[in-house]
């Protein structure tokens, strides 16, 4: 599903290259649940953003579902993202001017889902996550944990093939966090959704079938049993 080859990301500071990622070679098969771990500043979120097509590397190749991502124009990459990827951001990225209902509905609008069907899907998700009473509130009226929950629901609403989660339970209480991780596991096992999460939590990382350790922008260890495309 995902193949990264010789991916590096750097910034030029005073004529010197400062590497955020260096020589990343990684394959992730469809249906895997992968956890990315490493200390702050190790490049975890940058790697996730590159996989999610929200950022581009300084060099390297990326193939997603058999397509060479950087051979596509920006519009083509955006279409891939909207169609296949759900992103749970650490900093929520909710749209301030939209209500909870409207934020959750947004991915369905991108996919041109009919109004009546959108209403039913959003209603079901609001009920499932016990946030029906919050549907008419704006993000500024929610706590951090509630915003995180809305962000997770928005990522799941369009039934993506790939979920990318950056510290998905960071702002949730332990019970909510456990429920989200169990939900991810269920989506992965029962529906074959590929999940890649960045986490500091060893407990959350253990939900994954494979843990990738990053240190100073480099992958530290990959099991010999690594799945390939």
Image (tube, grey):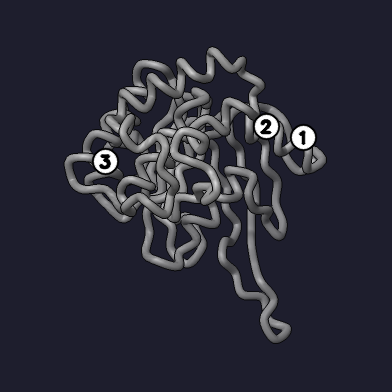
Residue sticking out furthest to the left: 175
Say what secondary structure mark 2 lies in.
helix
Q: Are marks 3 and 2 in contact (CB under 8 Å)?
A: no
- Residue 80: mark in rendering: 2
CA gap between label 3 and label 2 equals 29 Å
* Mark 2 in CB contact with mark 1 (< 8 angstroms): yes
Residue visible at 64% across and 53% down? Answer: 55
Q: Position of residue 202 (x, y in %)?
A: 25, 50
Residue occupying the point 78% across, 38% down: 75
Which residue bears the numbered disc 3? 206
- Horizontal and vertical percent for residue 227? 48, 31
Task: Report whether 180 appears left or right of 79.
Answer: left
**Horizontally, is 227 left or right of 25 in the view?**
left
Q: Which mark is residue 76?
A: 1
Rendered-image quadrant of the N terminus: top right
Q: Secondary structure at mark 3?
A: loop
- Identified at 72% across, 56% down, the residue is 59
């Amino acid at each position: 599903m995902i193949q990264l080859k010789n991916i590096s990301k750097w910034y030029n500071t005073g004529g010197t290259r400062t590497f955020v990622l260096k020589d990343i070679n990684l394959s992730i098969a469809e249906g895997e649940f992968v956890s990315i771990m490493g200390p702050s500043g190790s490049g975890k979120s940058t790697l996730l953003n590159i996989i999610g097509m929200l950022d581009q590397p300084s060099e390297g190749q990326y193939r997603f579902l058999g397509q060479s991502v950087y051979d596509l124009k920006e519009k083509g990459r955006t279409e891939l993202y909207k169609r296949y990827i759900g992103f749970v951001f650490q900093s929520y990225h909710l749209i301030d001017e939209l209500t909870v209902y409207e934020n959750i509905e947004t991915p369905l609008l991108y996919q041109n889902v009919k109004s009546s069907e959108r209403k039913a899907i959003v209603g079901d998700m609001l009920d499932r996550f016990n946030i029906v009473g919050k549907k008419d509130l704006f993000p500024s009226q929610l706590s951090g944990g509630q915003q995180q929950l809305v962000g997770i629901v928005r990522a799941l609403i369009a039934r993506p093939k790939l979920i990318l989660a950056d510290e998905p339970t960071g702002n949730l209480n332990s019970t909510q966090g456990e429920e989200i991780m169990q939900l991810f596991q269920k989506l992965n096992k029962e529906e074959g959704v590929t999940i890649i999460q960045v986490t500091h939590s060893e407990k959350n990382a253990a939900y994954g079938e494979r843990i990738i350790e990053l240190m100073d922008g480099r992958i530290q260890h990959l099991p010999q049993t690594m799945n390939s495309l």
